[in-house]
Amino acid sequence: MMRGEKDVNPLPPISVAKFGGTSVGTIDAMQQSADVIEQNPHTRFVVISACAGVTNHLVALAQGINDPQVRQDKLVAITAIHQAILNALPACQDTQTAVDDWHQTIADYANTATSAPSTALTDALVACGELISTYIFTHLLNSRGMATVRADARALLRTDSHFGCAQPDRQQTKIQCQNQLLPRLATHLVVTQGFIGADANGHTTTLGRGGSDYSAALFAEAIGAESLAIWTDVPGIYTTDPRVTDRARPISEISFSEASEMATFGAKILHPSTLVPAVRQHIPVFVGAARAPEQGGTWIREQAHSAPLFRAVALRRNQTMVTLTSLNMFHACGFLAKVFEILARFEISVDLITTSEVSVSLTLDQTHTQGDAPQLPEAAIAELTQLCQVEICANLAVVALIGNDMNHTPGATAPVFSALAQYKLRMICYGASNHNICVVVDDHDATHVVQRLHADLFE
């Protein structure tokens, strides 16, 4: 496979492996993940999430829980998850002490959050989940005779200071990884955290919910890895979420373009930004289930061997649509420029957009650590109101049909809109991309819309 230019690497080919929360959530899950690592000698760098369930507790604590008993219950639940795994491993006082210290740090942060919550505190608190899980997993691998060291991702992954959804500094991250990681990889397996990094001042940052995948891809890019494996609880990418319909089928191979569209439009198996570093360096990505590696998975490559018109259906819930209406927009220049200037100033990212002569509808894009629904700040609404009438509609969902050459294939939309005939479509986006047709529907219709599309187009 042709590869992009990169630094000369004296090490053997390196594969980066990322394990999600369910793959490190229990002692059995961690042992299964360790089995996967042992089966591939090229796996030298491992990125893991927090143990399943821990991040949700940490997010709740970061929001500030004033009731001492409720706060204590959360802390006890977090400790129980970690201690259950440690109790099943050979005793290691250094690991136990480190985990206990981080539990105390969590308690201190949670107490501060009751009186002084902030986005910076949220990142520092939520990051504790990943920091603890890597201590435990490193100990487990060493107990199995694998020479393993732990690395702190905050010393490797440099970001800006946009807490909750930080943007990585690729150049500084590459420098840190080249200087700190490559010497270790020559003699050890290295385990680090996904999802977290640090800004130029050393403050802990996070890349947004699901950011562990993104971290793994950034690390793979920085060290010139030959491949990236994303190990999760699902054996690959399916034609839609198997939880929505049991008729979903696995996909053995998919292109970067198709997979990026699926991730962007809600396929939970990948973080929307994951594939960007892989595309830049032509790094193939494998997605599989750590609990069942024998079932295979999905390879994501620059070009797939097949390119069907319809590949998959993705669903993204918890969407917000904003409709801006003004007669001044009719045959006028500069109206949209003013709208997007306001949105840019408030760091609001727009996802889908449609326009008419006197109105424009758009959906808001947000991938934030706290997982909140995207929304317009009151100050932004006030400024927009001076330009036009503003209507905000929540409780919506985006359903995206992913495929190839959709806007160049005659009749491509006919079976799609036939399947959707009985549903109310709040927005339709088609033509800007070869790879998707998107509709916005009421959230209570979303599951049925996906099931109907899948039944008509894939079954």
Image: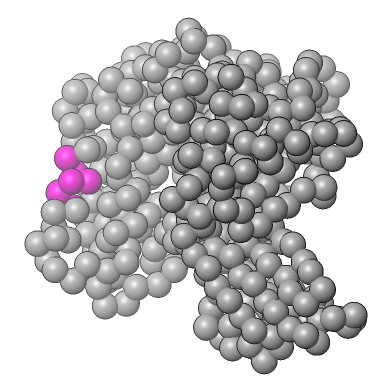
Q: Is residue 341 visible?
A: no
Q: Nearer the viewer, residue 361 or 51?
A: 361
Is 73 on the left-hand or right-hand side of 389? left
Residue drawn 61% across the image and 42% down it: 420
Quadrant in the picture for residue 64: bottom left
- Residue extending furthest left? 69
Residue 384: x and y in percent read 66, 84
Residue drawn 55% across the image and 73% down it: 392
Could you tell me what secondary structure mostly forms the magenta stretch? Answer: helix
Q: Nearer the viewer, residue 157 or 270?
A: 270
Q: In the image, is residue 108 above or below residue 313? A: below
Quarter that holds the C terminus: top right
Is 312 on the left-hand or right-hand side of 153? right
Quarter that holds the N terminus: top right
Residue drawn 22% across the image and 46% down it: 78
Residue drawn 49% across the image and 21% down it: 247
- Residue extending furthest front? 422
Residue 335: x and y in percent read 81, 81
Quadrant in the picture for residue 367: bottom right
Q: In the image, is residue 315 above or below residue 36? A: below
Residue 40: x and y in percent read 54, 12
State the extent of the magenta-drawn residues as a range: 75-80
Whether 113 is among the magenta residues is no
Q: Is residue 289 visible?
A: yes
Is 40 on the left-hand or right-hand side of 147? right
Q: In the image, is residue 358 above or below residue 451? A: below
Q: Nearer the viewer, residue 447 or 145?
A: 447
Residue 363: x and y in percent read 62, 62
